Amino acid sequence: MIISCSGRGDKDSGSTRMPVDTIGFARYSWQMDSIMARVERIFMYEELNPCENVSDDPVKIAISPHDDYTYVGALYPAVLSQVRSPLVILFGVAHKARDFGLQDKIIFDRHQYWKGPYGKVMVSQLRESIMGELEEEIFIIHDSIQRTEHSLEALVPFLQYYNRDIEIVPILIPSMSYERMVELSDSLAAAISAAASQHHLQWGKDFSILISNDAVHYGDEDWSGNNYAPFGSDTSGYNMALAHEKEIITSTLCGSLDPDKVRKFCEFTVQKDNYKEYKWTWCGRYAVPFGLLTGYHLAVMEGIELKGSSAGYMTSIDHPLVPVVDLGMGITAPANIRHWVGYVGIVYK
């Protein structure tokens, strides 16, 4: 069952959220079709999925990258082809939250549609039902930050590629402490559960959770003057960084989903004495734990246990790039041994 916003007219351009990244992501159907054909031809992306416990159970939570399509390539479909529900609750990074003075609250917006490559993507009325179940002091409605944020718009074209009628509920997560995440995610999970029950929606079958995240941002060049290369910016440093990435992923994201692992993820990625500062530069340092905690609370309510499996790991410099220049697309940042990004895909069933 799909809950739509058909009762609210698209009265002006402000009701449709337009793409902010017109270089790294596909805006048109022919671009998206070409990207998918090239990914399948170059990578045969099915082989990237090393999940040991592949099952036919529906995905309830997934973690996907959000970087330029030319870099991430095969990992997008490796994750998003498994998200089969017709409604997806999106948890995104709020990259510019500090510029807007936003923190410690869940961020919603009022857009009725998002522009996708195959037409408008409808924002589900489930959003209003969820907000109606929440205490007002724990969330804010802020259209401006959503119009500047790219972390969710990267995912929408792939979701729409697989389902032209996909509906979404976009949510951004700004900086907050682990303790605040536990508190707010519990409230949000209860609100999602109540709203889904009202509309007779089943988790996994009718709706799922999708978390946007890029893994480590590594190197000592072109990071706005910052040095994000604690192991050095050579081959040895690259390999040590990959080993650290593997430790984070296997010890906190794979296997049973539980709060202790989520807390450990936060201990890996943010400073103990200042959660607003990086310890290890994952831009999803708030979106990932918040989305996972929300999923954990939902699972407890349903009396189930979720387990995470890897859909693959890549970096922006370890594989051939998907050609995009002839499609009118390009890159938004360099990729080399002194400036690279990691990408991980995880699915929870």
Image (cartoon, rainbow, N blue to C red):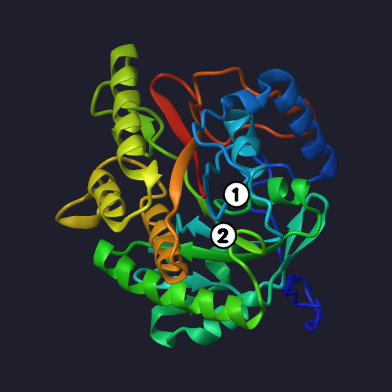
Residue at 14% x, 56% y is 273
Instruction: Locate residue 337: give its quadrant.
Output: top left
Q: Position of residue 223 (x, y in %)?
A: 38, 36
Q: Label 2 crowding class (10 Å Cα cut-off): few <14, some 14-19, many 20+?
A: many
**In the picture, residue 239 is in which quadrant?**
top left
- Describe residue 74's horizontal placement relative to residue 329 as left or right: left
The structure residue drawn at horizontal position 68% and vertical position 77%, both measured from the top left corner, is: 125
Q: Residues within 10 Å of mark 1 (few under 14, many from 20)?
A: few
Which disc number belongs to residue 57?
Answer: 1
C-alpha separation, residue under disc 2 versus residue under disc 1: 20 Å
Which sits in the foreground, 99 or 5? 5
- Secondary structure beneath label 1: loop
Could you say which quadrant of the image residue 152 lies in?
bottom right
Q: Which residue is mark 2?
A: 90
| Mark closest to the chain's N terminus, 2 or 1 | 1
Residue contact at pointers 2 and 1, CB within 8 angstroms: no
Is the N terminus in the top left, top right, bottom left or bottom right quadrant? bottom right
107 on left or right of 268: right
Q: Which residue is pictured at 65% across the width and 72% down the height?
A: 201
Where 107 sits versus 227, above or below?
Answer: below
Decide: is 98 above or below 310.
Answer: below
180 on left or right of 41: left
